[in-house]
């Protein structure tokens, strides 16, 4: 039985891809994590932390909903930014349905209007999801909805607070009903297709964000060099942190190695929980000027090089 038990209930199974699209900091990763009930996508107070498409999966009412978390869409300057934007639009184009997530507090900014207009002209199925609605007076929501629905033919509008969970259950029920009929594409115990090595790299990078704040904002990337299961069932992970300047390397390592030890300890603790087994994590820091302009490095973190 196992993976097929939903077929015996007399229900037809459904399965489909839903892209979560929005301006940076709209709350996409928080919503993804809230819908799946698992911490799959990196969440940090910084904007633009998701650099590749992450799949979160939830199963509800005989449907398997595959969530594509796209990078925030913004005006790209560097090659890295251009790759992130390309990945976001690819995510929206590949999906059965796009959710346009809007920070209700920030409102209909120029970026948000641009995203709505682009999706509107693409002819894709799209829904409007207003996030952080607990932070604004209810009467300000109607004009916001009117402005945005004039730009794109949203089939549905939802009001949620991804932070505290308000409205998320209604949204997940609607998504389960909206995806097309078809067999499940992933085994039911598979909550993410995010390869473990990318998960390891993102977890380390999240700690860099949380612990170095503005000192090394986007000037660091992490690559998992090796990911091996040991005979005792534990995992040994070696990862390299690349920074663009010598000064950043010193900040990252910290006084007598204190900063890199803290980053490693917290990342190891998170990974132990995510992988559900003991983790041995070894980090090293290397300086590489201009890594964010290197096509090979972009491909290594899961992005296509837009310059080719």
Image: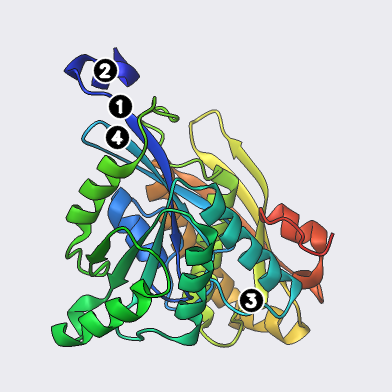
Q: Is residue 251 left or right of residue 261?
A: right
Tell me the number on the disc at residue 253. 3
- Circles 1 and 2, Cβ within 8 Å, touching? The answer is yes
- Circles 3 and 2, Cβ within 8 Å, touching? The answer is no
- Circles 4 and 1, Cβ within 8 Å, touching? The answer is yes
Mark 3 and mark 1 lie on one chain; the one further toward the N terminus is 1
Q: Secondary structure at mark 3?
A: helix
Q: Is residue 93 left or right of residue 108?
A: right
Mark 4 and mark 3 lie on one chain; the one further toward the N terminus is 4
Residue 219 to residue 205: above or below: below
Mark 2 and mark 4 lie on one chain; the one further toward the N terminus is 2
- The picture quadrant where one finds residue 85 is bottom right
User: What residue is drawn where x is 25% and y is 31%?
Assistant: 62
User: What residue is drawn where x is 21% and y is 87%?
Assistant: 140
Mark 1 and mark 2 lie on one chain; the one further toward the N terminus is 2
| Residue on which disc 1 sits | 13
What is the distance, in whole Å, between disc 4 and disc 3 at their CAs?
46 Å
What is the distance, in whole Å, between disc 3 and disc 1 at their CAs?
51 Å
| Residue on which disc 2 sits | 7
Query: Which residue is nearer to you in this view: 166 or 213?
Result: 166
- The picture quadrant where one finds residue 48 is bottom right
Tell me the number on the disc at residue 63. 4
Q: Residue furthest top?
A: 1
């Amino acid at each position: 039985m196992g993976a097929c038990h939903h077929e015996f209930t007399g229900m037809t199974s459904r399965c489909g891809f839903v892209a979560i699209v929005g301006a940076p900091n709209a709350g996409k990763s928080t919503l993804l994590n809230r819908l799946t009930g698992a911490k799959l996508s990196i969440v940090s107070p910084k904007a633009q932390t998701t650099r590749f498409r992450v799949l979160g999966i939830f199963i509800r009412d005989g449907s398997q909903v595959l969530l594509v978390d796209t990078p925030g869409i913004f005006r790209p300057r560097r090659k890295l930014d251009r790759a992130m934007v390309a990945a976001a639009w690819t995510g929206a184009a590949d999906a059965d349905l796009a959710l346009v997530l809007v920070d209700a507090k920030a409102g209909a900014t120029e970026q948000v209007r641009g995203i709505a207009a682009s999706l509107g002209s693409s002819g894709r199925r799209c829904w409007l999801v207003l996030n952080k609605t607990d932070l604004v007076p209810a009467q300000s929501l109607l004009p916001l909805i009117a402005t945005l629905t004039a730009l794109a033919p949203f089939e549905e509008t939802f009001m949620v607070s991804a932070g505290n969970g308000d409205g998320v259950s209604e949204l997940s029920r609607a998504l389960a009903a909206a995806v097309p009929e078809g067999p499940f594409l992933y085994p039911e115990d598979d909550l993410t297709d995010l390869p473990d090595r990318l998960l390891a790299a993102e977890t380390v990078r999240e700690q860099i964000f949380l612990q170095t704040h503005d000192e090394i904002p986007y000037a660091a990337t992490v690559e998992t060099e090796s990911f091996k299961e040991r005979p005792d069932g534990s995992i040994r992970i070696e990862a390299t942190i690349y920074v663009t300047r010598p000064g950043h390397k010193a900040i990252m390592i910290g006084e007598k190695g204190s900063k890199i030890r803290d980053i490693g300890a917290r990342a190891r603790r998170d990974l132990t929980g995510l992988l559900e087994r003991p983790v041995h994590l070894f980090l090293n820091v290397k300086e590489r000027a201009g890594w964010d302009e290197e096509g090979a490095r972009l491909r290594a973190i899961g992005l296509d090089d837009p310059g080719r």
